[in-house]
Amino acid sequence: MDDAGERLRATSRHGPSFSLGNKVARVAWGLSWLLLARWTPPPLHRWRRWLLRAWGAEIGARARVYASVRIWHPANLSVGAGSILGPRVRCYNQGRIRIGASVVVSQDASLCASTHDMADPLFPLLLRPIAIEDHAWVAAEAFVGPGVRIGTGAVLGARGVAMRDLAAWTVYSGNPARPLKQRSQLSE
């Protein structure tokens, strides 16, 4: 058998990353969101907060989650008070995603809390939690990669790609994200 065939055979022996129960729960969650929230008008944030909490998410007071948001597993999501998950945000949260208070995750942004071990020929799944600290902003179409921590008050500009931690009160842009300037801190 050639090398490619051997790799394919080895990969087929690799077990699933998630149990059948996990998969069934995610299908039930997806149907629940589709039937109970996906069609709701923008002002019904309270209803969507309730539904997310019912599925295990930690959602702070006054958090706004838009109906078009896609959340892989609500029990792995924590959103602080007054934060916003804008239209079409994707939370690929196989690993935990923790979003602080007064955070904005703008439209079409992606948060990805897992990756694969490239050193292993079977590419097993690795969970890498994401933390977005208070007062941060992830702008439109930005991507936050596995294991990234976005510091308090940091900004990841539109279409920016964060694959490393972002320092507090700093504005970043580009792919990969690079610091542009300091941001004024809030006075308490």
Image (cartoon, helix red, strand yellow):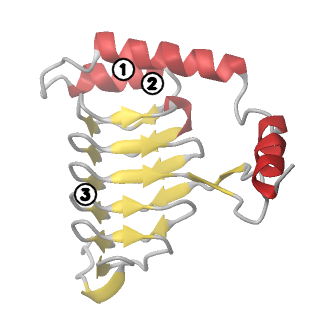
The C terminus sits in image quarter: bottom left
Residue type, mark 1 in image: Trp
> Looking at the picture, does residue 29 appear above or below residue 148?
above
Q: Does 9 sit left or right of 99 as displayed?
A: right
User: Mark 2 is on which residue type?
Assistant: Arg
The answer to whether 180 is drawn above or below residue 6 in the figure is below
Residue shown at 29% from the left, 78% from the top: 174
Residue at the spot x=34%, y=26% of the render?
49
State the residue position of label 1. Answer: 50
Could you tell me which secondary element the residue under label 3 belongs to?
A: loop
Quadrant of the image occupied by residue 69: top left
Dots 3, 1 in contact, CB < 8 A: no
Q: Residue furthest bottom?
A: 181
Q: Is residue 91 left or right of residue 18?
A: left
As drawn, the residue found furthest toward the top would be 35
Position in image of residue 152 (x %, y %): 39, 69
Is 123 on the left or on the right of 82, as rendered?
right
Secondary structure category for the residue under label 1: helix
Residue highlighted by disc 3: 141
- Identity of the residue furthest to the right in this view: 1
The residue under label 3 is which amino acid type? Glu
* Marks 3, 1: nearer the viewer: 3
Measuring from the top left, give residue 62's x and y in whole percent.
26, 37
The residue that label 2 is drawn on is 53
Q: Earlier in the sequence, mark 3 or mark 1?
A: 1
Depth order, front residue of 161/139: 161
